Image: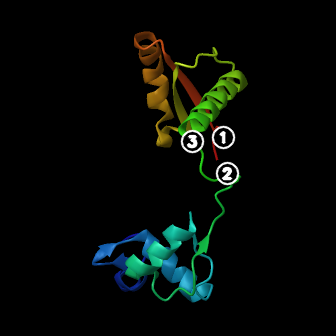
């Protein structure tokens, strides 16, 4: 038994392709209790992919795409390589200034963006950073994101 549920309940609501599946339980709950409304995907493309390729999501009226929460840059059209290189170095210098790093156009910047939790591997970064920085002095490390949920 799982969570004190009867086998028949598990088979009906929490089994997918012959295996126990908690995601299926969530989808079935949404179908029955919310009329199929309430499923979100990380992007419009991923939502379309889920509906097309995952039979578990069939029967849902739609999958809402979450906004990426970033402000996409205006499309400046075609730019030459010189313009792109200039912008890249300006952006690098801006990041270095913002983060209090040495301004070094030749630096290799490693960037982690995400929650600062063990689940995301921040503990590995902390463990490896001293060795990496000592053996590769051209490297700079930037960690950005919330400390936890």
CA separation, marks 2 and 1?
31 Å
Nearest the viewer among 125 and 87 is 87
**Residue 63 shown left or right of residue 137 in the figure:** right
Give the percent coordinates (x, y) of residue 133. Answer: 47, 15
Q: Residue at x 45, y 74 (%)?
A: 50
Mark 1 or 3, which is nearer the eye?
A: 3
Q: Are marks 2 and 3 in contact (CB under 8 Å)?
A: no
Q: Quadrant of the N terminus?
A: bottom left
Image quarter for residue 65? bottom right
Residue 76's disc number: 2
What residue does disc 3 label? 80
Residue on which disc 1 sits: 146
Give SS at disc 3: loop
Earlier residue among tags 1 and 3: 3
Q: CA distance from mark 2 to mark 3?
A: 11 Å
Q: Secondary structure at mark 1?
A: loop
């Amino acid at each position: 038994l799982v969570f004190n549920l009867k086998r028949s309940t598990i088979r009906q609501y929490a089994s997918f392709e012959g295996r126990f599946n908690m995601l299926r339980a969530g989808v079935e709950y949404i179908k029955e209790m919310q009329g199929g409304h309430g499923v979100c995907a990380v992007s419009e493309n991923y939502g379309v992919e889920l509906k097309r390729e995952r039979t578990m999501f069939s029967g849902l009226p739609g999958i809402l795409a979450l906004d990426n929460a970033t402000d996409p840059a205006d499309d400046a059209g075609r730019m030459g390589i010189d313009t792109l290189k200039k912008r890249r170095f300006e952006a690098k210098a801006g990041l270095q200034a913002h983060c209090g790093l040495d301004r070094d156009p030749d630096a290799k910047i490693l960037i982690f963006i995400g929650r600062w939790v063990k689940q995301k591997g921040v503990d590995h970064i902390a463990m490896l950073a001293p060795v990496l920085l000592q053996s590769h002095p051209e490297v700079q490390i930037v960690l950005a994101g919330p400390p936890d949920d």
